Image (cartoon, rainbow, N blue to C red):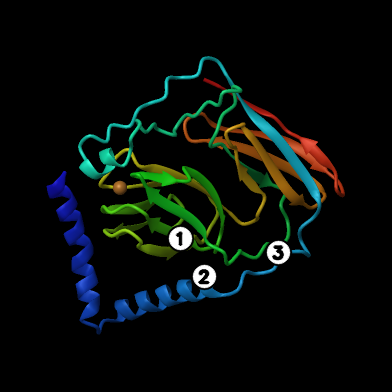
Amino acid sequence: MLKRALLLLLTILIPVSFIGCGGGKDEDALLEEEEETTTAAAAPAAAPAAAAAGSATVTGKVAFEGTAPAMEKLKMDADAFCKAAHAAPAYSEEVVVNANNTLQWVLVYVKEGATGSFPAPTTPVVIDQRGCQYHPHVFGIQVGQPLKSVNSDSTLHNIHALPKKNTEFNIGQPFKGMETLKKFDVPEVGLHFKCDVHKWMGAYAGVLNHPFYAVTNDQGTFELKNLPAGNYVIEAWHEKYGAQTQNVSVTGSESKTVDFSFKG
Ligand SMILES: [Cu+2]
């Protein structure tokens, strides 16, 4: 494990020291890109897309049918830091069935019907590497909105994005307090992140070109706010149980309920 971590650290440090030498075209492009993301993050928060947003709401819950599978304990023994970070066992968040028989970590979002332009918020979405787990486990983010990866652990993590439609990246963060900004260019639901040092670490993003998304909580509920009047296809996406869709129409400041149910 130590040998692997050292190797990974070397792969990170070698390109960094190379950039330090200055010169090449690629480096300039890289720095420019970095500057762009930093500037965007520092800018004041954009006003909400008032023109395009409405006042309808879709709320609901995601039920879990069947017997909840036993929570999977994460085996962190191979890494002394990660093991010591947890007084009690840590569990996988792949399948989290709540006490009220609902499912947590389901991304619920408008799949079809969101028309208009929704500028990306400049406030970053934060993904934290803490206790050798990603927090949050599932999140939504808009196209062009910064994603801030933070390492809160005094150990090496890397955040490796494995997109199918966006550009792959792999950022090593060997020290506590490190932060990196990245953006995504196109919508993509189920974008997977992993850490190459700790194989149990995983997270998923829904990259969307509008703000109408939510992730189910420990009550299995969600709320899609500020919807303009319209006809929508709502999708509920779960990393293990797949995706389901339902149609809903809303007018004015109407509030409608859409419930989903996944079979275990
Ligand atoms: Cu890690």
Mark 3 vs mark 2, CA separation in Å: 16 Å
Mark 1 vs mark 2, CA separation in Å: 9 Å
Q: Is residue 81 left or right of residue 149?
A: left
Amino acid beneath label 1: Lys
Point out the tag, 1 or 3, that comes first from the N-terminus: 3
Tell which residue pokes out farthest to the right in this image.
252
Residue 50 appears anywhere in the view: yes
Mark 3 burial class by Cα count in 10 Å: few <14, some 14-19, many 20+: few
Q: Which residue is mark 3?
A: 48
- The percent coordinates of residue 22 (x first, y second) are 24, 83
Residue 167 appears anywhere in the view: no
Tell me, yes or no, whether the two marked residues, 3 and 2, touch with CB atoms within 8 Å: no
Mark 2 CB lies closer than 8 A to ligand 1: no
Amino acid beneath label 3: Pro
Tell me, yes or no, whether the two marked residues, 1 and 2, touch with CB atoms within 8 Å: yes
**Residue at point 52%, 26% (across, down):** 97
Q: Is residue 173 left or right of residue 235?
A: left
The secondary structure type at the circle numbered 1 is: strand
**Residue at point 49%, 29% (across, down):** 96
Tell which residue pokes out farthest to the bottom in this image.
23
Mark 3 CB lies closer than 8 A to ligand 1: no
